[in-house]
């Protein structure tokens, strides 16, 4: 076997530092009980190449961690090698060409802070702790994505290590099938991206935000109205509602949040229609058309799902008549557990698909239960609510977001059936021996919910 030399640290199971690295690879406090044979803490691109070749020599499969924000710890599997890319966080800008070249561990605040110095912007993940790697490979529904599209459509090229250890530069001309799959296949992608070459965009001239909070008794009126008004709003407006836990209030509430990313072309009068909601005079509190910053938006998103909690998330794309959608969601909305638990009602509306991207799962609404708790004894109750209430309306699903990937707990498609089939065809060419772990299967989950399902 070849002698593999690393600048980073290779930790075999049982070595000092292994368990710390294994647990640190998952942001969620609910750590998976899965144990790789070894973990490579890569310090540079050459480590990734050597790590893939080491895995081939040992007959190991490979899991990948970029930012570690996968709720289910998708990169951590039993056996094989965990490639930890969390130190690959370089950023290089070509301002004139509007291209950013970034490592997979780069997080939104760092990227947009650099871009903002030059009047540029990228639709990163909403939470500031999300690494670009997993987020963008899975589609990437980020800030102002209703206008710019999912982040994966802004991938110009990738530098990627393939299953045989070869490092290639893939763009629409040199490796079109590989780049097609990178634009949306999420945790099923069959390579290690060490650098993304991204098209970046003009920054908004102003960001304005309106937030209304209403009593929970007005939930259906607020949700139904927001759903029906979506098509009248500019795509530069991001609109969502949150039902359940409400900081600063003694009871659950429903909050309607609208953010406008204004430019000279859009104008700045984008949030006025929100004030026409029929229950406006019943708001408990309201912030109207307040100027904000991308840094403040990251901070607000971070408070939604704070670190240190055990988290279970899930979500489906839905469409149809607002009354029918509300009827389907009502059991979930009526059964939100007490504590830091809520449902996100995220209004997307759709974005044109592209032939050079496999991204293909979307609908008007993204319905997402979010459960956060401390006590491990409460795992099953929260997981049953997050996954079970969606399983009950599986027939309404238009797919899931890979960002909230829970395929091991509730299987669904993150791509159209046609595109999912093509991904597997391309995988058979680039990774014929299955070196890279694909999508998680139900048997790989170690959550209380999955265990409960197997005993039913």
Image (cartoon, grey):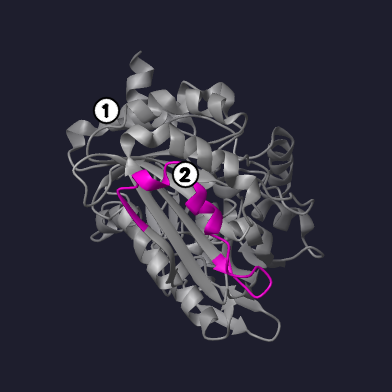
Query: In the visual, does 65 lie left or right of 306?
Result: right
Label 2, secondary structure: give it. helix
Mark 1 neighbour class, 10 Å CA radius: few under 14, some 14 to 19, many 20 or more = some
Residue designated by label 2 = 404
- 260 vs 346: above or below: below
- 313 vs 184: above or below: above
Q: Residue at x 65, y 55 (%)?
A: 182
- In x, y percent, where is residue 207? 50, 70
- 49 vs 274: above or below: below
Q: Are marks 2 and 1 in contact (CB under 8 Å)?
A: no
Residue 34 placement: quadrant: top left
Query: In the visual, does 84 lie left or right of 317?
Result: left
**Segment colored magenta:** 261-286
Q: Is residue 338 magenta?
A: no
Q: State the separation of the CA atoms marked 2 and 1.
A: 19 Å
- In x, y percent, where is residue 397? 57, 29
Q: Nearer the viewer, residue 28 or 151?
A: 151
Residue designated by label 1 = 381
- In x, y percent, where is residue 30? 28, 44
Q: Nearer the viewer, residue 168 or 252?
A: 252
């Amino acid at each position: 076997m070849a002698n593999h030399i690393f600048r980073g640290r290779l930790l075999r199971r049982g070595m000092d530092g292994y368990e710390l690295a294994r647990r640190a690879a998952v942001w969620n406090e609910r750590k998976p009980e899965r144990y790789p044979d070894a973990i490579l803490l890569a310090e540079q691109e050459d480590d990734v190449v050597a790590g893939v070749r080491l895995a081939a020599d040992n007959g190991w499969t490979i899991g990948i961690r970029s930012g570690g924000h996968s709720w289910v710890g998708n990169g951590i599997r039993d056996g094989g090698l965990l490639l930890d890319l969390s130190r690959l966080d370089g950023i290089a800008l070509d301002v004139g060409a509007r291209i950013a070249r970034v490592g997979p561990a780069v997080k939104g605040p760092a990227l947009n802070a650099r871009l903002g110095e030059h009047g540029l912007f990228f639709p990163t993940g909403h939470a500031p702790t999300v690494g670009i790697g997993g987020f963008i490979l899975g589609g990437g529904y980020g800030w102002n994505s209703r206008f710019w599209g999912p982040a994966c459509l802004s991938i110009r090229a990738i530098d990627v290590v393939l299953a045989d250890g070869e490092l290639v530069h893939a763009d629409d001309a040199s490796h079109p099938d590989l780049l097609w799959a990178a634009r949306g296949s999420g945790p099923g992608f069959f390579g290690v991206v060490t650098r993304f070459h991204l098209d970046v965009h003009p920054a908004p001239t102003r960001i304005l935000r309106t937030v209304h909070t209403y009593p929970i008794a007005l939930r259906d009126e607020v949700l139904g109205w927001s759903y029906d008004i979506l098509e009248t709003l500019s795509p530069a407006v991001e609109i969502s509602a949150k039902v359940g836990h409400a900081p600063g209030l003694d009871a659950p509430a429903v909050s309607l949040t609208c953010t406008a990313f204004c430019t000279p072309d859009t104008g700045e009068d984008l949030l006025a229609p929100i004030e026409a909601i029929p229950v406006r005079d019943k708001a408990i509190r309201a912030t109207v058309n307040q100027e904000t910053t991308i840094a403040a938006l990251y901070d607000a998103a971070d408070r939604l799902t704070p670190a240190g909690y055990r988290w279970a998330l899930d979500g489906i794309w839905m469409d149809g008549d607002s009354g029918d959608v509300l009827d389907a969601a009502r059991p979930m909305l009526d059964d939100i557990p007490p504590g830091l638990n809520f449902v996100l009602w995220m209004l997307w509306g759709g974005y044109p698909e592209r032939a050079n991207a496999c991204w293909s799962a979307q609908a008007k609404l993204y319905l997402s239960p979010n459960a956060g708790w401390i006590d491990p004894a409460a795992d099953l109750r929260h997981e049953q609510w997050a996954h079970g209430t969606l399983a009950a309306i599986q027939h309404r699903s238009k797919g899931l977001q890979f960002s909230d990937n829970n395929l091991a707990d509730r299987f669904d498609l993150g791509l159209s059936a046609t595109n999912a089939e093509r991904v597997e065809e391309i995988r058979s060419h680039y990774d014929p021996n299955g070196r890279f772990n694909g999508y998680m299967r139900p048997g790989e989950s170690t959550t209380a919910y999955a265990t409960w399902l197997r005993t039913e």
